[in-house]
Image (tube, rainbow, N blue to C red):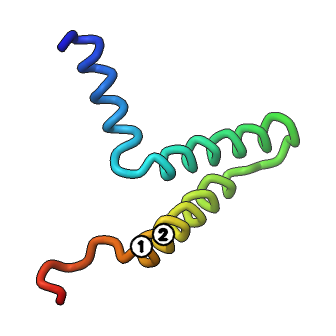
Amino acid sequence: MSRVRTFGAFWYEFVVGDDWRIAVGVVLGLAATAALVHLAHVSAWWALPVAVVVGLALSLRRATRSGGPGPTGEP
């Protein structure tokens, strides 16, 4: 495997990891924060924490509905 491909694979795994939806949510949160600051001239320090909380809630909801991974030894 070439060094460039290995480098790209590392960064893909580091950024995307197990759930691509979380990575997209972070990018959208950063974009929304930047848009609020630059276009609306709003102090938008609060936008990214809100996006993180929403992303976490959606991720937990999806995991609990699908019967996500639980403790080992469960019947």
Q: Most extreme residue toward the left, as rendered? A: 73
Q: Residues within 10 Å of mark 2 (few under 14, many from 20)?
A: few
Question: What residue appears at the point 41 percent right and 51 percent down from the top-left corner?
Answer: 19
Q: Give the residue at mark 2.
A: 62
- As drawn, the label of residue 66 is 1
Cα separation between marks 1 and 2: 6 Å
75 versus 43 height, above or below? below
The x and y percentages for residue 8 are: 33, 22
Q: Residues within 10 Å of mark 1 (few under 14, many from 20)?
A: few
Q: Amino acid type of disc 2?
A: Arg
Q: Name the quadrant of the C terminus.
A: bottom left
Q: Nearer the viewer, residue 43 or 35?
A: 35
Residues tagged 1 and 2 counted as in contact (Cβ below 8 A): yes
- As drawn, the label of residue 9 is none
Horizontal arrangement in the rendering, residue 30 relative to residue 67 (left or right):
right
Question: What residue appears at the point 63 percent right and 62 percent down from the top-left corner?
Answer: 50
48 versus 30 height, above or below? below
67 versus 44 height, above or below? below
The x and y percentages for residue 71 are: 20, 79
